[in-house]
Image: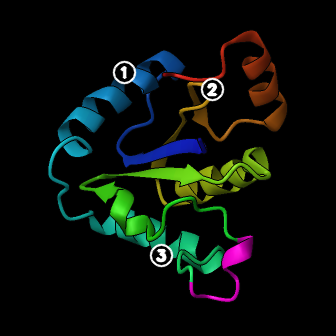
Amino acid sequence: MGYQLVVWEGVRPADDDAGVEQFRALAEQHLLGEPTEPTPAIRAFIEALTTVWTDDPDDPRWDKSPWKYPPLLDGASGPMVFLDLRLRSEVIISTVIASIAEDHGLVTLDLMVGMLRPVSENVIAEHARRTSGSLN
């Protein structure tokens, strides 16, 4: 198991519950079944991520990369991308990823705690203590 984030184009939902609902609707449309070509915004976001952490297992920097399943474009479909991270500094890395997404005008949902990101690491840790820590 990894640490999972999903990033999509759209208006940021009003709260975490609305974010989970929006994710589920978008996932049904874009992640289940045949993938569609990622949008330019999702491609630009992935490009920004891969300038920070390679998604090429043959790259000498791969051991520092957080990606569980490369290449990242394989997790993208239309206006969204599913990111599965290796369990290693995932809270810090997920915060950086969410900040990059926000810089690109994208929405991030942390599937492990069911929260829209970015939020402070303390909020995430407290939420995880109060809940089961997963949407599954």
Q: Are marks 3 and 1 in contact (CB under 8 Å)?
A: no
Residue at label 3?
Answer: 47
Amino acid carrying mark 2 in the image: Val
Residue under pointer 2: 113
Q: Which mark is residue 123?
A: none
Label 2 – label 3 distance at C-alpha: 26 Å
Choose the circle earlier in sequence order: 2 or 3: 3
The question of residue 70 being in magenta is answered with no
Residue 3 is situated, as x and y percent measured from the top left of the image, at 62, 43
Q: Residues within 10 Å of mark 3 (few under 14, many from 20)?
A: some
Secondary structure type for disc 3 = helix
Q: Which residue is mark 1?
A: 21
Is any part of residue 58 visible from this angle?
Answer: yes
Q: Nearer the viewer, mark 2 or mark 3?
A: 2
Indicate the amino acid at tag 3: Glu
- For the residues carrying marks 1 and 2, which lies nearer the camera in this image? 2
Residue at position x 53%, y 80% in the image: 56
Q: Is residue 80 left or right of residue 52?
A: left
Q: Position of residue 111 (x, y in %)?
A: 54, 32
Residue interval drawn in magenta: 58-64
Q: What distance separates the C-alpha of mark 3 from that of mark 1? A: 27 Å
- Amino acid tagged 1: Glu
